[in-house]
Image: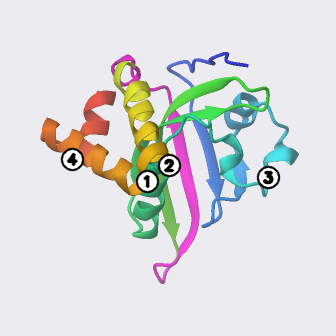
Amino acid sequence: MNREITLKETDFIVSKTDERGKILYGNKSFIDISGYKESELLHQPHSILRHPDMPKIVFKLLWNRLKDKKEIFAYVKNISKDGSFYWVYANVTATLDNYGKIVDLHSVRRKPSAKAMEIIPSLYKQLQQEERSSGVDASLKLLQKILDEKKESYDDFIFNLQN
């Protein structure tokens, strides 16, 4: 199936995972859009929703940031149980205990901007093609080249697309 689900401006998808990405909680929006029952999602890797069109470099950046206990914003294409897909603008943060150890990861996702959806799908296609031909490190170099040409950091690029 190749049906797109478009989020409403008021949709907020929330989930919490353990430090390795196993789902601990999902709000009603998360469960509904996923197409899974809550019992099918809990304790499963969040990657159960990873669409095959997503470049690996985006998740490498995400995990690197989270390991450094820093938040990250990213555009993500997810897949529902029935094969339909949906794009989100995600903010992922680590919850830390009193000793600075990661307790869990918290993600809030909302509708991506029209501006982002004009750019991100084709960018991700380029990154994924680079990964297929030359690997994830080459994909990172391509992303960095694109950001350098724009004279923007990753964060500025992502934020400017959403605003």
* Kind of residue sitting beneath label 3: Leu
Residue kind at label 1, given as amino acid type: Val
Decide which of tag 1 and tag 2 comes sooner along the chain.
2
Label 4: state its secondary structure.
Answer: loop
Q: Residues within 10 Å of mark 2 (few under 14, many from 20)?
A: some
Which of pointers 2 and 3 lies earlier in the amino acid sequence?
3
How many discs mark residues in the rendered view? Answer: 4
Q: Quadrant of the C terminus?
A: top left
Q: Residue 64: image x %, image y %?
A: 42, 63
Q: Which mark is residue 49?
A: none
Residue 99 forms part of the magenta stretch? yes
Residue at the disc numbered 4: 153
The magenta-colored residue range is: 98-117
Q: Which residue is mark 1?
A: 136
- Residue that numbered label 2 is attached to: 56
Disc 2 secondary structure class: helix
Please give the name of the residue rendered at 70% of the width and 45% of the height, measured from the top-left corner: 26
N-terminal label among 1 and 4: 1
- Distance Cα–Cα, label 2 vs label 4: 19 Å
From mark 3 to mark 1, how far is it between C-alphas?
29 Å
